[in-house]
Image (cartoon, helix red, strand yellow):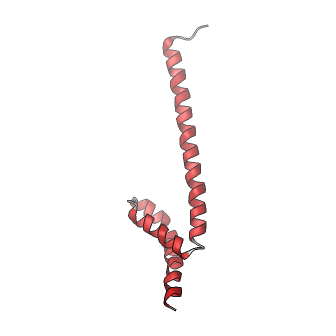
């Protein structure tokens, strides 16, 4: 049985929605992987910690996002402070 034009349109829209979902999922996965790598390095490097803090401070974060990264920001501040402590000794 041949599909009607409306059925073909609905099928194409469903396929498009699946592709968009897949693209969003891949984008999110990339962000998670890159973010994890950057955070890991920043927690080992006081200069990178400082740069990441500057990026986060420049980024307009929503209140609930700020709360979600508050602990990380404190750890980054602590790591970034190591550079200034070593520089003044």
Q: Is 38 in front, or is 29?
A: 38
Q: Is residue 54 above or below residue 2?
A: below
Where is residue 28 shown, x and y percent of the image?
A: 55, 49
Q: Is residue 70 visible?
A: no
Q: Is residue 17 above or below residue 84?
A: above
Q: Name the residue located 55 percent from the left edge and 46 percent from the top edge.
A: 27
Q: Is 30 in front, or is 5?
A: 30
Q: Is residue 32 left or right of residue 61?
A: right
Q: Name the residue located 46 percent from the left edge and 69 percent from the top edge.
A: 53
Q: Is residue 68 visible?
A: yes
Where is residue 12 shown, x and y percent of the image?
A: 53, 23
Q: How many marks?
A: 0
Quadrant for the N terminus in the image? top right
Which residue ends up furthest to the top in the rendered image?
A: 1
Q: Name the residue located 49 percent from the left edge and 81 percent from the top edge.
A: 81
Quadrant position of residue 57? bottom left
Where is residue 51 shown, x and y percent of the image?
A: 48, 69
Q: Is 63 in front, or is 25?
A: 25
Q: Is residue 54 above or below residue 81?
A: above
Which residue ends up furthest to the front in the rendered image?
A: 87
Where is residue 33 shown, x and y percent of the image?
A: 60, 55
Q: Name the residue located 43 percent from the left edge and 60 percent from the top edge.
A: 64
């Amino acid at each position: 049985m041949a599909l009607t034009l409306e059925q073909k349109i609905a099928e194409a829209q469903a396929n498009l929605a699946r592709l968009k979902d897949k693209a969003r999922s891949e984008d999110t996965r990339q962000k998670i992987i890159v973010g994890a790598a950057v955070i890991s390095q920043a927690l080992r490097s006081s200069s990178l910690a400082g740069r990441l803090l500057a990026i986060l401070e420049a980024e307009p974060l929503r209140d609930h996002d700020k709360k979600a990264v508050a602990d990380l920001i404190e750890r980054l501040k602590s790591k970034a402070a190591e550079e200034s402590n070593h520089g003044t000794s």
